[in-house]
Image (tube, helix red, strand yellow):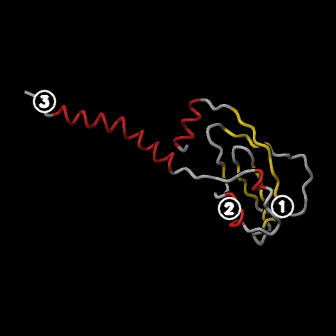
Amino acid sequence: MRSTRRPLILCLAVLLVLGPAGFWWVRWLARPVHRITPENIDQIYVGMTRKEVEALFGVPPGTYARGKASLVIFHHNEPVEEGMLGPVDEWVGEEAAVMVYFNESGLVSHHRRTAVATVEEAFHEKLRRWLGF
């Protein structure tokens, strides 16, 4: 006589295997596509709003580099200019990054493009990034 538990165990095993794969597939499809490029950074001008900068890059401020960890190199030895002490947002992509300074009216007062260097991530770091931790 055939066990009635066998189909249940088989279904649970399939769910256990396909569930995480489906989760990662949906997460991969839902990732935001950015336009953080040197050419778009060059289009930023004094007086733009935060919404206009977000529209230019296609994403809100944040790090959008994929695959490898990105280290942003800021040049802290440059003199502080007037207007650089207000709120600042950062957009980081694979090939470019920018710090955008806003004045008290919420308009761009200054921006500074920065270099992006990439380093290979360890497996546990990739796993943490994939899981969103």
Residue 32, compared with residue 86, is above or below; it is above
Which residue position holds label 1?
Answer: 110
Residue type beneath disc 3: Ser
Residue type beneath disc 1: His
Q: Residue placed at 60% from the left, 52% from the top?
A: 33
Return the residue nearer the eye: 89 or 22. 22
Q: Is residue 35 left or right of residue 27?
A: right
Q: Which mark is residue 78?
A: none
Q: Which mark is residue 54?
A: 2
The image quadrant of residue 87 is bottom right
Q: Earlier in the sequence, mark 1 or mark 2?
A: 2
User: In what quadrant of the picture does the N terminus appear?
Assistant: top left
**Mark 3 and mark 1: Cα distance apart in space:** 72 Å
Which residue position holds label 3?
Answer: 3
Residue extending farthest to the right is 79
Return the residue nearer the eye: 104 or 18. 18
Residue extending farthest to the top is 1
